[in-house]
């Protein structure tokens, strides 16, 4: 089997409401969709959701990266995923477009094998439970949003915090008071606190039964995060601090977190994600799988990975649910309450896209 054609499209997705985290606010996302075709009539789909602030890339740099990577893929057997990632490594950065290509390649490999991607990669479980994220607002507004989401069937809430330590405590208290004791609460400070503030807040909110705290301090302060971990009664999860497998090794050496949040957009796709999970599992560190502003395309790939690997015990695969616009026409990951499943179909199981939403950019053949 050989790759004959690579196409890239742009899609803009509006959020249901302005989404605010400690790093900034946004109301929409512009993503790239890639389609890879083979001489055996198979087509794979992938998606990139670049972020200057987190993945340190953008639509512009993604397209420049594709100018270099896409021509190299023509004529290559897409099942040679290890070789393809060797080609990718020759270009520094741009993990989100590498993730899109990797996802499309796995879609093809699954179709060629007649297996869903999660069965190719490990097949550990048949469904996952996702949390749902609440952006930064006033304590009262966050409590109201929480009640609404619990009524919709979500049993795990992820609260964005990290703006002001005292207000953050109020936000967490307001949500816990409004939803009662049966709902799991995770918090994500997106690097918003100093080491001292993080230790202080986490000791204050321990009484509200917080499952874990994500990225309390600056992404490049692993020593600081290790100090927070040592003095926090709440488990610490690294997100922005760990992009790829090499970062995971650094984190393990410094014993800087209890959990690592894997994102396909940060690490460059399923292939690297498995390496991160292997390192973490061997070091006794659990994984979450998270997301950026992806549509249901990349979310579907995330659900496959979470279903495949035992070490991914937490899922934050909700960005498609926060979007107003839907680009998948048929197939892909479903949601029922807070349970996500994928179709029992070869590859990613995405059967069709809303083609009229896609803006064609370029084709390589
Ligand atoms: Mg995070």
Image (cartoon, rainbow, N blue to C red):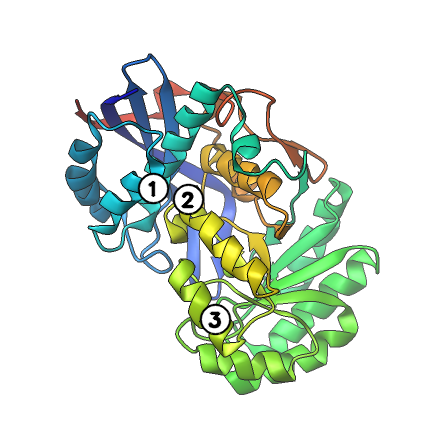
Residue 320 spot, x, y in % from top left = 52, 38
Using the rendered image of the protein, determine whether residue 292 is visible from the camera's viewpoint.
no
Residue 50 vertical position relative to residue 38 in the rendered view, above or below: below
Q: Position of residue 95 (x, y in %)?
A: 33, 50
| Residue carrying label 1 | 82
Q: Earlier in the sequence, mark 3 or mark 2?
A: 3
The foreground one among 29 and 259 is 259
Instruction: Return the x and y of residue 180 as percentages of the image width and height.
Output: 83, 59
Residue visible at 20% across and 39% down in the picture = 69
Query: Nearer the viewer's eye, disc 1 or disc 2?
Result: 1
Circles 1 and 2, Cβ within 8 Å, touching? The answer is yes
Residue that appears at 84% across and 60% down: 181
Secondary structure category for the residue under label 1:
helix
The residue that label 2 is drawn on is: 271
Left or right of residue 247, residue 80 in this image: left
Q: Residue at x 55, y 36 (%)?
A: 304
Question: Along the line of sight, which residue is nearer the eye, 66 or 143?
Answer: 66
- Residue found at x 20% / y 50%: 90
| Label 3 crowd bin: few (<14), some (14–19), many (20+), radius 10 Å | many
Quadrant of the image occupied by residue 305:
top right
Kindly identify which residue carries mark 3. 251
Mark 2, Cα crowd under 10 Å, few <14 / some 14-19 / many 20+, is: some
Q: Is residue 304 above or below residue 258?
A: above
Could you tell me if residue 267 is visible in this image?
yes
* Element type where label 3 sits in the image: helix
Disc 3 beta carbon < 8 A from ligand 1? no
């Amino acid at each position: 089997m050989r790759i004959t054609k690579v196409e890239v499209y742009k899609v803009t997705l509006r959020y249901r409401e302005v989404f605010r985290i400690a790093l900034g606010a946004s109301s929409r996302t512009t993503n790239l969709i890639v389609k890879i075709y083979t001489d055996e009539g198979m087509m794979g789909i992938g998606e990139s959701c670049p972020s200057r602030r987190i993945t340190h890339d953008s639509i512009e740099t993604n397209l420049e990266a594709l100018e270099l990577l896409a021509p190299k893929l023509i004529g290559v057997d897409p099942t040679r995923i290890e070789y393809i990632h060797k080609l990718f490594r020759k270009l520094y950065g741009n993990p989100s477009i590498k993730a899109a290509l990797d996802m499309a390649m796995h879609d093809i490999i699954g179709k060629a094998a007649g297996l869903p991607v999660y069965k190719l990669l490990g097949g550990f479980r048949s469904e996952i439970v996702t949390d749902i994220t609440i952006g930064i607002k006033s304590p009262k507004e966050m409590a109201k949003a929480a009640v609404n989401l619990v009524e919709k069937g979500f049993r795990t809430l992820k609260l964005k915090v990290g703006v002001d330590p005292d207000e953050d405590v109020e936000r967490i208290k307001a949500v816990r008071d409004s939803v009662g004791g049966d709902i799991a609460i995770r918090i994500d400070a997106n690097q918003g606190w100093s080491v001292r503030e993080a230790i202080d807040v986490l000791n204050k909110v321990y009484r509200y039964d917080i499952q874990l705290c994500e990225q309390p301090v600056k992404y490049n302060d692993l020593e600081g995060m290790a100090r927070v971990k040592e003095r926090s009664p709440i488990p610490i999860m690294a997100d922005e601090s760990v992009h790829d497998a090499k970062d995971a090794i650094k984190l393990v050496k410094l014993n800087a977190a209890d959990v690592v949040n894997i994102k396909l957009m940060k690490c460059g796709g399923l292939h690297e994600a498995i390496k991160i999970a292997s390192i973490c599992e061997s070091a006794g560190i659990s994984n979450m799988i998270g997301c950026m502003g992806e549509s249901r395309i990349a979310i579907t790939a995330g659900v496959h990975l979470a279903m495949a690997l035992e070490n991914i015990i937490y899922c934050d695969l909700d960005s498609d649910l926060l979007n107003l616009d839907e680009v998948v026409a048929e197939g892909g990951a479903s949601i029922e309450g807070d349970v996500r499943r994928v179709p029992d179909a070869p590859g990613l199981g995405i059967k069709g896209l809303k083609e009229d939403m896609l803006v064609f950019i370029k084709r390589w053949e």
